[in-house]
Image (tube, rainbow, N blue to C red):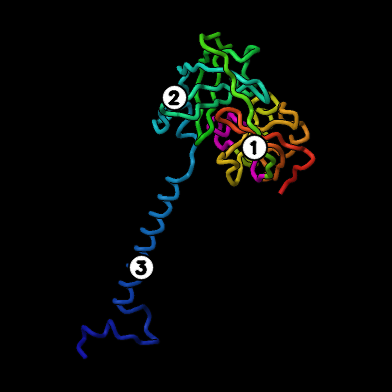
Amino acid sequence: MTSGDTDDFFIGWRRGQPHAVRRFALLVAMAAIVVFAGAGALLGLQVDDPARNLFARTGVVDEAPEPWLGDQLLQGVVTHRPTPILHIAPDAARPGGRALLLSGYGKRGAEVPEGPGPFAFAGGLLRRGAIEMLVVDDVPEPAEGSPQAPQPVPLGRWRAVGEICDGKCYPGGMKPGSGLAHRACATLCIDGAVPAIFVVASPVAGATYLLLAGPDGGPLPDDLRGLIARPIELEGDVERLGAILVFKVDPARARAL
C-alpha cells in the first residue's frame, strides 16, 4: 500500500474520517440545504398573502401594493340585509356578476341610502381570493339604471367548520387579518357594523367564505360574539344572493372546536 492510500483506510482509533467519506457527507449536506431551501421558497409562494393585494386596482390583482388607491368608481344595486352589499351586473369578465362587501373608514360600516339604487360608489378596493371589499369614501350618489336587486335563492341547511372574521381586515385591511392575534380587532370591526364573514375549512356550495347573518337574515347575533376568531362549527340555512352566499346561522347550534 502506498502512502497516498492511507487516508482512505479506516482505523478505529484514528481521529477523523477518510477523505471520501467527508466529501460524501459534505455533498449530502449541501444537497439537503438546496432542496429544503427550494421547497420552503415554493411553499412560501403559494401562501395567500393579502398584503400583496392591498387596495388593488379593479381587475389587477398582482401589482405592487400601494398605501391607498381611492380611485375606484363602481356602480350597482344594493341589498341591505344582513349588511349592505354592492351587486354589479355580469359582464364578459365576470359572467356571474360581482358582490362587494362595503365598509367605511376605520372600524365602522358604510353609510348607504335606503333602497336598492342603483348607486355610484367611490372608494378603495380590498381583494383576497373571491372576497372583495370596497372601503367607501363618502355617501354614494344616485346613478342611472334599473334597480333590479338580486333575490335570495335557498340552498338548504348546512353545517360548516371555519372561523368568523371581519370582511375588512381579512381581505387585506390588516395583517394578520385572522386568528387569535386578530381577535380583538375583528370583534371591534364587527361591533362597528363591518360585515362578518365565515371563512370555511371546506367549500360550501363552491364558496370559500360566506356572509354571516342571524336566523332572520339580519346582522350577526350577539350570541356569537365570543366565538369570533376561533375554530368553530356553525349550522344554518344558506342562500345565494347574487354572487355571494349568505349563511343564516342558528346560534343555539354553534360550538367551539
Measure the C-alpha gap from mark 3 to mark 2. Answer: 55 Å
Mark 2, Cα crowd under 10 Å, few <14 / some 14-19 / many 20+, is few
Residue 91, label in figure? 2
Residue 141 x %, y %: 55, 9
For this rendering, which residue is in front, 248 or 133? Answer: 248
Tag 1: amino acid: Leu
Furthest-right residue in view? Answer: 252
Q: Write the residue at 41% across / 50% down.
A: 42
Q: Earlier in the sequence, mark 1 or mark 2?
A: 2
Q: Secondary structure at mark 1?
A: strand
In the figure, 232 relative to 62: above or below?
below
Residue at image point 70% right, 34% down? 248
Amino acid bearing label 3: Val
Nearer the observer, 3 or 58: 58
User: Is 175 within the magenta?
Assistant: yes
Foreground mark, 3 or 2, reads 2
Disc 3 + disc 1, Cβ < 8 Å:
no
> Is residue 95 inside the magenta stretch?
no
Judged from the image, the secondary structure of the residue bearing numbered disc 3 is helix
Task: Write down the residue under mark 1.
Answer: 155
| Image quarter of residue 210 | top right
**Quick one: label 3 or label 1, which is nearer the N terminus?**
3
Tell me which segment is drawn in magenta: 160-177
Query: Which residue does the numbered mark 3 point to in the structure image?
Result: 28
Q: Amino acid at mark 2?
A: Asp
Among the two numbered marks 3 and 2 on one chain, the one whose residue lies closer to the N terminus: 3
